[in-house]
Image (cartoon, rainbow, N blue to C red):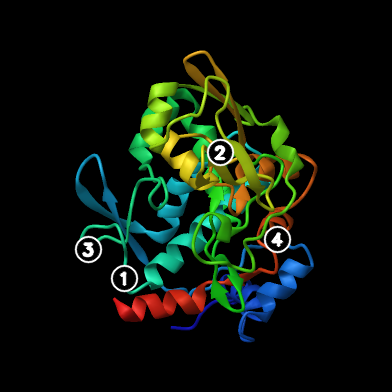
């Protein structure tokens, strides 16, 4: 059947209309191993370039209260960790820094052959032993009327760091973090056996504004002596600090001839920090602390303070983790997928 000229013209226009989006999109396809994404980012483009070949990795979380496994996509897990570990009303750049630490931690955990402290089949627990994780349902219950804006903000922070991890010499770091410093972070070898070059004491003056910066605990003398296995010499003495760390915390303390590390005192007396002073008042020991947490790695309140001053998430993490780089996780995820 012979097509009329007007019908032929309409058909041609229809085909051209269909082809235009393809013609516009094809030149932007990345055939250079990720160089296009880098160029767009360098130019400040708002276009999000997602690697279609990025492996799908799942995380098996042991839900402690329910005593069962929950398996979910890695990025959903990161959302649940960030939402649980850092207040959603923190600055966006601080939340992005937290997303980076959470993703780095879980990828390193997934790469480990031995997963300590988890039941068979699990990669992590949902507690501070690893990273605190809460499901979307739990967050809805916790946040109630504030759920919508909080989850949107957290998801945005995770999405804007998608595929990024912290590395040192090409390997994922131990991305440890804590609540509040005493004005300095602590070097890893003051708290744990290994000394890591990117976990050294650095200044963190922003923490003074944290509601958790100062603390106090009153311990009865009898409990103090029992928990430490000591006998105080007299009614006025407690112990003498004989060494301080690079992070200006208690390194060693001598109590009537028995020497403890600051870490031992903190653990035995359940203190908020290893930066403490004490004095005896009658039948009690009054202990004042500065900071909250082990002090190694990124201070969360410090990160938020930096963000308030206009620092970006990459500046924040590179302040607290010296000598590290922000790298793509694609190759590591591929290795993890191949192992499973």
The residue singled out by tag 4 in the image is: 318
The residue singled out by tag 2 in the image is: 273
Q: Residue at x 57, y 59 (%)?
A: 188
Q: Is residue 50 above or below residue 78?
A: below
Q: Marks 3 and 1, Cα distance to the nearest angstrom? A: 11 Å
Foreground tag (1 vs 2): 2
The quarter of the picture where the C terminus appears is bottom left
Question: Residue most toward the bottom?
Answer: 32
Foreground tag (3 vs 2): 2
Tell me which label, 2 or 4, sits earlier in the chain: 2
Q: Marks 4 and 1, Cα distance to the nearest angstrom? A: 29 Å
Q: Marks 2 and 4, Cα distance to the nearest angstrom? A: 24 Å
Describe the element under mark 1 as helix, strand or loop. Answer: loop
x, y percent for residue 262? 54, 45
Label 3 packing within 10 angstroms: few (<14), some (14-19), many (20+): few
The residue singled out by tag 3 in the image is: 121
The residue singled out by tag 1 in the image is: 114
Foreground tag (2 vs 4): 2
């Amino acid at each position: 059947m012979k097509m009329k000229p007007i019908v032929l013209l309409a058909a041609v226009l229809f085909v051209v209309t269909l082809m235009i989006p393809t013609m516009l999109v094809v030149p932007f396809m990345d055939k250079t191993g990720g160089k296009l994404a880098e160029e767009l980012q360098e130019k400040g483009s708002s276009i999000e370039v997602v690697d279609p070949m990025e492996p799908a990795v799942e995380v098996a979380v042991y839900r402690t209260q329910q005593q069962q496994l929950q398996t979910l996509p890695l990025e959903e897990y990161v959302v649940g960790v960030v939402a649980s570990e850092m207040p959603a009303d923190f600055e966006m750049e601080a939340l992005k820094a937290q997303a980076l630490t959470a993703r780095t931690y879980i990828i390193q955990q997934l790469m480990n052959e031995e997963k300590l402290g988890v039941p068979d089949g699990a990669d992590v627990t949902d507690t501070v032993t690893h990273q605190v994780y809460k499901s979307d349902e739990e967050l809805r219950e916790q946040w109630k009327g504030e759920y919508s804006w909080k989850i949107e903000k957290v998801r945005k922070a995770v999405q804007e760091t998608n595929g990024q991890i912290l590395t040192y010499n090409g390997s994922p770091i131990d991305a440890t973090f804590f609540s509040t410093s005493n004005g300095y972070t602590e070097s890893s070898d003051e708290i744990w056996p290994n000394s890591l070059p990117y976990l050294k004491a650095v200044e963190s003056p922003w923490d003074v504004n944290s509601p958790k910066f100062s603390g106090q605990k009153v311990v009865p003398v009898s409990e103090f002596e029992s928990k430490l296995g000591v006998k105080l010499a007299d009614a006025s003495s407690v112990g003498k600090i004989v060494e301080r760390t690079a992070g200006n915390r208690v390194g060693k303390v001598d109590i009537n001839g028995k020497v403890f590390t600051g870490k031992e005192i903190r653990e035995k007396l359940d203190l908020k920090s290893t930066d403490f002073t004490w004095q005896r008042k009658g039948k009690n020991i009054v202990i004042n602390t500065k900071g909250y947490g082990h002090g190694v790695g990124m201070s969360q309140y410090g990160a938020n303070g930096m963000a308030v001053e206009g620092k970006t998430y990459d500046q924040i993490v590179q302040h607290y983790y010296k000598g590290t780089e922000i790298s793509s996780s694609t190759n590591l995820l591929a290795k993890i997928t191949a192992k499973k």
